[in-house]
Amino acid sequence: MKRQRTSWNNWLLISGVILLAIIPLLAIRDSEFSGADGQAEAVIGEIQPEYEAWFEPLLTPPGGETESLLFALQAGIGAGTIGYVIGLYRGKHERNSTFK
């Protein structure tokens, strides 16, 4: 009975995540999603037009695709790390509750 309830809760959470990802795409039509860096640069340009950057990036990606690839790779590594840690602690919790 407990396992069936857990399965139901997991499907409910997965459905909620999918809805949270889809609803903004449907609710905000004709929107252009841009990165936070570009938006921050535009706001800084409006507030302080004579502002000069005090630091240049060490590496500049050769194109937008490479930048997107690096961003996706960073997100994948972060999600994998978080999933691994959650799974590790869940496994430890189940192992400890089994032996008690």
Image (spheres, helix red, strand yellow):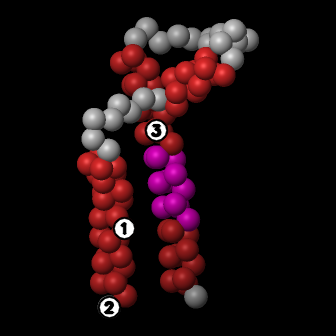
The furthest residue to the right: 54
What's the distance in space between the residues labelled 2 and 3, CA to CA?
A: 36 Å
- Specify few, some or many for label 1: CA neighbours under 10 Å numbering under 14, 14-19, or 20 or more: few
Query: Residue 75 bears which disc, if any?
Result: 3
- Tell me the element at label 1: helix
Query: Residue 1 bears which disc, if any?
Result: 2
What's the distance in space between the residues labelled 3 and 1, CA to CA?
A: 21 Å
Query: Residue 13 bears which disc, if any?
Result: 1
Q: Quadrant location of residue 93?
A: bottom right
Whether residue 43 is situated above or below residue 22 in the rendered picture: above
Of badges 3 and 1, the one in the foreground is: 1
Report x, y in % for residue 76. Answer: 43, 39
Q: Which residue appears at 40% of the width and 11% of the height?
A: 63
Q: Earlier in the sequence, mark 3 or mark 1?
A: 1
Whether residue 19 is situated above or below residue 10 in the rendered picture: above
Of badges 1 and 2, the one in the foreground is: 1
Report x, y in % for residue 85. Answer: 54, 56
Q: Based on the picture, tell me whether residue 87 belongs to the magenta stretch.
A: yes
Q: Amino acid at mark 1?
A: Leu
Q: Amino acid at mark 3?
A: Ala
The reply to whether discs 2 and 3 touch (Cβ–Cβ < 8 Å) is no
What's the distance in space between the residues labelled 1 and 2, CA to CA?
A: 19 Å
Q: Nearer the viewer, residue 75 or 3?
A: 75
Report x, y in % for residue 35. Answer: 47, 29
Q: Amino acid at mark 2?
A: Met
- Tell me the element at label 3: helix
- Tell me the element at label 2: loop
Report the magenta residues as a range. 79-89
